[in-house]
Image (tube, rainbow, N blue to C red):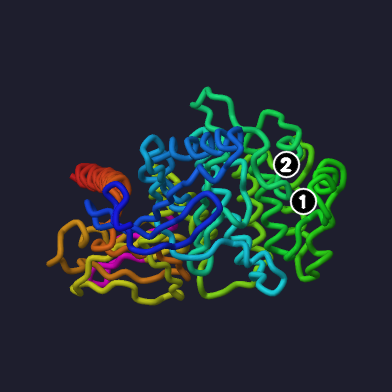
């Protein structure tokens, strides 16, 4: 088989009981994709076949609707032809399954960062009216050290769809008590499942040790899990508390929002994880969200900013930019203050959330720096290369343009105020 629909098959990636996944090429944009071809004929039970087809249609209905850097994109689907298939973003990497084994456990800080990104992705899905219902390590893909993408939305509850949802889906070990009871579900069922996933990544064990599904279900409904530190002593009390709160059987005591869950993870990373030269993505994202320059950026656009930027720490009294040098990169202050100097005279002080160097960027490639910039305190800089920004999405580039416009308007207002005062003082002298 060389072609399915318009997609050119490159090679087989994997094969399961009801589907085969191929690496394929979309010839229109020369993009590699993962093409999943379904074979429902192997399901001899007609009821099971209908239920499975409904799950596939649920996931196919999300094509083009969930656009987030930590969710696998669905580009296309054909569930009505002779060959049923779905076209998805191709992601190089493994699932988190192997990192839930005792001999492959990740460092605590890295686990917290992975779970944080899952929180932000599932918060985005919730805002789109989507509850995943099957969060587990096998449905979370890992790229590099800590970049993740959530996959398999076939079990999802979608608010905009009025059709009856398939019940009894999901993996029993990761199901919330309300999911087992087949009660109406909210995003809190995904919070519970992510808590179980975190428990597995921390300890290499599931929170409930059961010989069969009936015993598992009984324990989920009636037994409180042991703290993760029982099985991994270096886990601090703060991390135990986060996992156990996410897994509370009573939804009133469980995290009420994804943001609450994410905030506790940020606090853990800030206070309990040893400091390092590299910035955690959790720290970067939280910093961007708090800065005035990025106040109108959506979460999706902030993740994109994070990927196109370089972050540096600069000691006090260091030269950052020099007048007359060439360069287009611009900077946003994530922390600290800098002095802007022209021919030895102080022009201004810039602080957290301010930007500098943008005039050279706006002027074009032949621009040279018109001022010196020195660190007044130790600073954290977010540096962005315009050539990299030019390859960002239109929405991200638009937000930068709007942010620059806001900066220029504020600076013009300050200049007008200064000029007015100077003219007023000059008039008084006369």
Helix, strand or loop for the magenta stretch, by majority:
strand
Residue 425 visible in the picture: no
Of circles 1 and 2, which is in front? 2
Farthest right residue in view: 223
Quadrant for residue 310, please give it.
bottom left
Where does label 2 land, which residue? 176
- SS class, disc 1: helix
Question: Pointer 2: residues within 10 angstroms few (<14), some, or many (20+)?
Answer: many
Between 428 and 327, which is closer to the camera in this rendering?
327
Which residue corresponds to the image point at 24% horizontal and 67% vertical from the top-left? 371
Indicate yes or no whether the magenta region holds residue 352.
yes
Left or right of 414 on screen, residue 223: right
In the image, residue 153 above or below residue 377: above
Which residue corresponds to the image point at 40% horizontal and 70% vertical from the top-left? 375
Between 130 and 139, which is closer to the camera in this rendering?
139
Which residue corresponds to the image point at 62% horizontal and 67% vertical from the top-left? 98
- SS class, disc 2: loop
In the image, residue 163 above or below residue 221: above
Left or right of 130 on screen, residue 245: right
Residue range in magenta is: 339-353
Left or right of 200 on screen, residue 217: right
Image quadrant in which the N terminus is located: bottom left
**Label 1, label 2: how many angstroms apart (C-alpha)?**
13 Å
Residue 30 visible in the picture: yes
In the image, residue 323 above or below residue 257: below
In x, y percent, where is residue 112? 63, 60
Left or right of 428 on screen, residue 151: right
In x, y percent, where is residue 333? 41, 60
In x, y percent, where is residue 255? 69, 42
Residue 244 is tagged as 1
Between 240 and 152, which is closer to the camera in this rendering?
152
Reading the chain from its start, which is encountered first: label 1 or label 2? 2
């Amino acid at each position: 088989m060389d072609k399915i629909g318009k997609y050119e098959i490159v090679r087989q990636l994997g094969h399961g009981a009801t589907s085969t996944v191929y690496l394929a090429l979309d010839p229109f944009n020369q993009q590699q994709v993962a093409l999943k071809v379904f074979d429902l004929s192997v399901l001899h039970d007609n009821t099971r076949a209908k239920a499975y087809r409904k799950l596939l249609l649920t996931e196919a209905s999300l094509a083009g609707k969930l656009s987030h850097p930590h969710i696998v994109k669905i580009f296309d689907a054909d569930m009505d032809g002779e060959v049923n298939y779905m076209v998805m973003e191709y992601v190089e990497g493994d699932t988190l399954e192997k990192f839930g084994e005792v001999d492959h456990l990740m460092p605590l800080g890295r686990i917290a960062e992975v779970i944080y990104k899952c929180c932000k992705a599932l918060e985005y899905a919730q805002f789109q009216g989507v509850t995943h219902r099957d969060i587990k390590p096998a449905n979370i893909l890992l790229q590099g050290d800590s970049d993740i993408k959530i996959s398999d939305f076939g079990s999802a509850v979608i608010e905009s769809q009025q059709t009856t949802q398939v019940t009894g889906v999901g993996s029993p070990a990761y199901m919330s008590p309300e999911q087992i009871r087949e009660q109406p579900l909210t995003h809190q069922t995904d919070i519970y499942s992510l808590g179980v996933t975190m428990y597995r990544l921390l300890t290499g064990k599931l929170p409930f040790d059961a010989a069969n599904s009936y015993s598992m279900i009984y324990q989920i409904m009636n037994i409180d899990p042991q703290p993760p530190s029982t099985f991994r002593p270096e886990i601090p009390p703060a991390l135990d508390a986060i996992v156990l709160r996410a897994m509370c059987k009573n939804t009133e005591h469980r995290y009420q929002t994804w943001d609450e869950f994410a905030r506790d993870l940020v606090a853990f990373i800030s206070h309990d994880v040893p400091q390092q030269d590299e910035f955690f993505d959790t720290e970067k994202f939280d910093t961007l969200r708090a800065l005035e320059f990025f106040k109108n950026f959506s979460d999706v656009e902030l993740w994109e900013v994070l990927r196109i930027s370089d972050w540096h720490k600069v000691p006090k009294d260091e030269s950052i930019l020099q007048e007359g040098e060439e360069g287009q990169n611009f900077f946003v202050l994530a922390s600290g203050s800098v002095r802007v100097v022209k021919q030895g005279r102080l022009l201004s002080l810039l602080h957290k959330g301010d930007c500098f160097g943008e005039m050279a960027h706006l002027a074009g490639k032949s621009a040279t720096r018109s001022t010196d910039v020195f660190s007044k305190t130790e600073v954290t800089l977010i540096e962005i290369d315009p050539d990299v920004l030019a390859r960002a999405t239109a929405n991200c580039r638009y937000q930068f343009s709007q942010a620059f416009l806001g900066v220029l308007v504020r600076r013009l207002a300050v200049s007008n105020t200064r000029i007015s005062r100077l003219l007023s003082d000059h008039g008084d002298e006369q």
